[in-house]
Image (tube, rainbow, N blue to C red):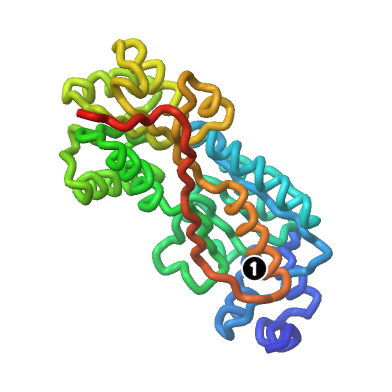
Amino acid sequence: MKIQEIAKEAGVSTATVSRVFSNHPNIREALRERVLSVARRHGYHPRQSQKRQNVVIVSPFREIYPIRSYVEMVISELTLELSARGYRIEMLPQDNLGCLDRIRFCGVVSIGVDAEKFGNWEACFAAPLIVVDRDIPAGGVGGEIYSVRSDEVQGMNLGIDHLARNNCRKIGAIIYGEAGIGNAETRRNAVLHALQRNGLPFSNQLVRFALADTYVEEIGKLLRFDIDGLFCPGGNAGIIAAYALSLYNRRIPEDISLIASERSMFSRYGIPPQTTISQDYAAQAAAVADLLDARLRGEPFPHNTVIPYKLILRDSVAFHTS
């Protein structure tokens, strides 16, 4: 289908259709919806202009859940990758999403913000929405909403399996976050399954949720179960866990082996340096840029991109002989 046919069916000029597809800010919402509904009805996906390579990065406007370190690391890699490919970047806090109607862009990258927060995306915009670290909403596959995320189940398996291989016989885990928010529930279920698969004790008493202000207390509760391994995915859990264990007079790794999430400003410099699981931030950024490149060329791209975690071996895990 040609743009002229869309214009004729929508009862507008071809110039108006072009402005709708380029997210021009001076288009009335009802008119934008009329043009986009015609395009959707005929399965038409416009090829974005390669002259306007503006990318909007949307991030949480406050720490409503513990992902600040994650957001900062993703943004760092995204700015490097997108800039190297000639994209211009505009930052937008989540609470300013209404400004999107006044911005011209070829794509939006949402970090740690659910796609539902953007409302009925395809009724308003012709450009791709890429949600990083989140899933596509139910029924969203096939349109212009895409997901780039890490394999949470595989990452939890990495941590638990490594502790099990080092003969940890009772492993406790604290999931940094709250039940039902972000990836916390997925991580807890994956940890419980990994413990069961390794023939180790598993229960909600051994796999707990915590935020920064309850973390030390929750580790104290785990120690009552005589754990010899501790897995702390998410947030800045590594530094808090090390501090908590020192308060309870537990040595790492002699008394308890510890695996946390990679935090570049601490993990390698801790005493001892911490074995960690790490999301592949560079691969995430490259996947986002590949997706934008493909859509600018009018080419299809997988709606779900899942990237494996990495295990970084250091000194906080020891083989337990008893």
- Say which residue appears at 46% left-offset and 43% top-offset: 311
The x and y percentages for residue 239 are 45, 22
Seen in the image, is 257 located left or right of residue 67?
A: left
**Residue sitting at the far front:** 321
Is 15 above or below relative to 133?
below
Seen in the image, is 218 located left or right of residue 93?
A: left
The mark total stands at 1
Toward which corner of the image does residue 28 lie, by quadrant? bottom right
Residues 171 and 294: in front is 171
- Residue marked by disc 1: 126
Is 67 above or below relative to 308?
above
- The type of residue carrying mark 1 is Ala
The x and y percentages for residue 302 are 54, 70
| Image quadrant where one finds the N terminus | bottom right
Res. 102 in view: no
- Say which residue appears at 67% left-offset and 58% top-offset: 289
